[in-house]
Amino acid sequence: MKKLLGLLLLPLLFACSQSADEDIVVKAQAIHDHDRCHMCGMMITKYPGPKGQVHLKGQAVTPKFCSTRDMFNFVLQSENKRQVQELFVHDMAKTDWEHPQDSAFIDAKTAWYVYGTSKKAVMGPAVASFGTKEAALKFAEELGGIVLSYDQIDSKLLAGE
């Protein structure tokens, strides 16, 4: 009888442990001078433009990227997509393009992006990130490009198709 009761309670224990993991608040980590891009191995702080980082479920290491473009190329890979817990990018309306500050990290899924701008970044055309659609529209008006939501960025766009 005790074994039966234990088996009946097991799913409830599992459900509780899952929700506890989901309630953990993940914050952006600082990017240090010697941090290297998870995709290309370049020194992250050596280059201008917005950076990104991905927090993966159950992983202690946080992949950091020298560009939002590299972050998207990583996240859009099918084997990585389902492991993503949180993503952060710089709000370029609140930080310097040449030296983005850690205090300007925002949730990448709610950010707005400008693709195809004349502003130079690293690893191909910039995918400039902004906290508001208005800031992204203003940037695109001044420096070119199209404004996109997180869900509109895909591998075809990044490949230039």
Image (cartoon, rainbow, N blue to C red):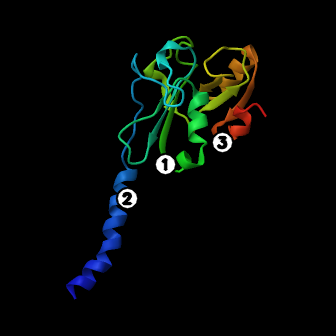
In the picture shown, does residue 1 fall above or below 75? below
**Would you name the residue on which mark 3 appears?**
151
Return the residue found at the far front. 41
Which amino acid does the dot numbered 3 rest on? Answer: Asp
Q: Count neighbours of disc 1 (C-alpha within 10 A) and say few if under 14, some if 14 to 19, many if 20 or more.
A: some
**Residue designated by label 1:** 83
Q: Residue at x 47, y 18 (%)?
A: 43
**Residue on which the image places disc 2:** 18
Mark 3 or mark 1, which is nearer to you? 1
Q: Tell me the amino acid under the disc marked 2.
A: Gln
Query: Which corner quadrant holds the N terminus?
Result: bottom left
Q: CA distance from mark 2 to mark 3?
A: 26 Å
> Which of the pair 77/41 is nearer the observer?
41
Q: Quadrant of the C terminus?
A: top right
Which residue appears farthest toward the bottom when viewing the image?
1
Q: Is residue 128 left or right of residue 30?
A: right
Residue beneath the point at 73% across and 35% down:
157
Residue 131 appears in the figure: no
